Image (tube, helix red, strand yellow):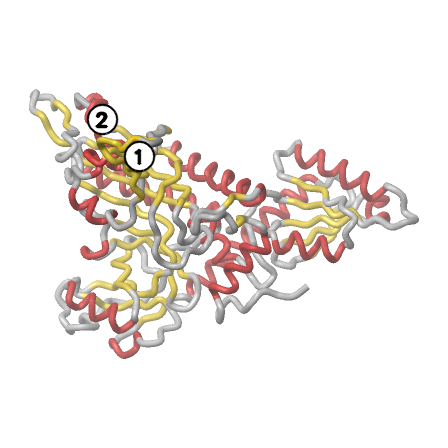
Amino acid sequence: MAELPDKAERFIDWYLEAVEVAGLTDKRYPVKGMNVWTPYGFQARRLLDGVLIRGIEATGSQAVEFPTLIPRTEFQKEKQHVKGFDEQVYWVTRGGATELDVPLVLRPTSETAMYPIFAIWIRSHRDLPLNVYQIVNVFRYETKTTRPFLRIREIHFFEEHTCQLTDDAAAARCRSNLDTFHDIAEALALPYVASRRPEWDKFPGAFYSIALDLPVGGARTLQVGTIHHYRENFSRPYEIRYEDLSGALQYVHQTTFGLSERLLGATVAVHGDRRGVVFPSSIAPYQVVIVPIVSQNSGPIALDAARALATRLRARDLRVHVDDSPDRPGAKYYLWESRGVPLRIEIGPREAAAGTVTAVNRLGEKKSLGPGPLEEPIIQALADFDTALSARARATFQQSFSVAHRLEELANSTTVRLVAWCGAEACGHQIEQAIEGAVLGVPEGPLPIDPGPPPGCIACGKTVDSKWALAGRPL
């Protein structure tokens, strides 16, 4: 079977083929950028949702679901928000043959849908904090080239919205979101960097925005999520107020935390190779595929052993598939490797008789298991695979960053660059022009590599307030 294009040299071609070969989505739907979730891709998405839900509900956030349509009267209350989305929204102007008195927006995100109701729900300090989330589809008229999971027009979206008593409480919620995403990224074996976006690139209406970025080869980066601190920028136009202990009315301080199906695309982008997709066991539709090696003279012994093993593994809450199709073993191996299954178990007649199996993980590591009970060795093999996958991703992550000391070094960058930056917008734009990309911002927490103390700004040379910032080329 032919290998996929070289990932480092032809990333986009490689990515599109990897998604296609794995059968994660069908892009032939007659609306560009609105793709069909196939059974295999939908299962991966559902498992990803489970990771997000467990992470956020551990912090006390509760699920809600708000309507898809937003009246223009509510959408326009926050002018900065509208300015940020007015070129991306879909408008509904008719219901059947009737022109609507108030046009409706298909939600591009849910601030303007939720906040009029928050103003009803919140009356007293006893109603706070309010921490709720929903997983819904949002719609944005993407004008650039669409790509499955990465740049689309109907987006499967996770969004937490919170209301807090004070600015400090809102900042604490943002830090909690960072901790939650750390756990999510660990489950997906995805190294990332969290950066506070520069003022000109923050979310419209935000006091500050923290973006969650992954390097995906060369100087390219993929933003998979954001955390926003709004202060009172939305609570004032939507009149979300509470009565404090003295009886005075105070505006709430708000935050949001947004993630999307880009996380699935990021998993493909970071872990995949020339054989196709590689799934961590947390979101693999099948964690184990068992391939019985059947010959004309061996009878059903291998198939019976495969089915019996699958039953025992399912009793241990593993997602298992027995490939008893008539295809040749080599074709089966190729199929499940391209679809990213973490562990393949091969059982031939001799192995079935001996109570052993051959285990091959998606990274190519092969070992014999048994004789004796096989459940624990297989569970351990899955854990070992996840550990190895995480280590491989971390090693690649470390190699994806380098330091630049002069603007001239940014041209034709083959890594994401750490640059000293004074924080001035004019200097930031000089950096962006030199790298033909963007200033991603100042990292929150540890830097991805240790560059030492920052020297003077790479653009103006000033040492006052100079900090390390990241510059790259967002996909």
Viewport quadrant of the C terminus: bottom left
Q: Position of residue 250 (x, y in %)?
A: 11, 29
Q: Is residue 203 above or below residue 404?
A: above
Q: Position of residue 92 (x, y in %)?
A: 30, 38
Q: Residues within 10 Å of mark 1 (few under 14, many from 20)?
A: few
Q: Amino acid at mark 2?
A: Leu
Which quadrant of the structure image shows residue 373? top right
Q: Residue at x 48, y 51 (%)?
A: 189
Q: Which one is in front, 355 or 203?
A: 203
Q: Residues within 10 Å of mark 2 (few under 14, many from 20)?
A: some
Q: Is residue 167 visible?
A: no
Q: Is residue 280 visible?
A: yes
Question: Which residue, given by chain and number where applicable, does mark 2 sit on?
Answer: 128
Spatial separation of the CA atoms under disc 1 and disc 2: 38 Å
Element on which disc 1 rests: strand
Q: Residue furthest toward the right?
A: 297
Q: Amino acid at mark 1?
A: Arg
**Mark 1 touches mark 2? (CB < 8 Å):** no
Question: Which residue, given by chain and number where applicable, does mark 1 sit on?
Answer: 94
Which quadrant of the structure image shows residue 63? top left
Q: Is residue 10 left or right of residue 318?
A: left
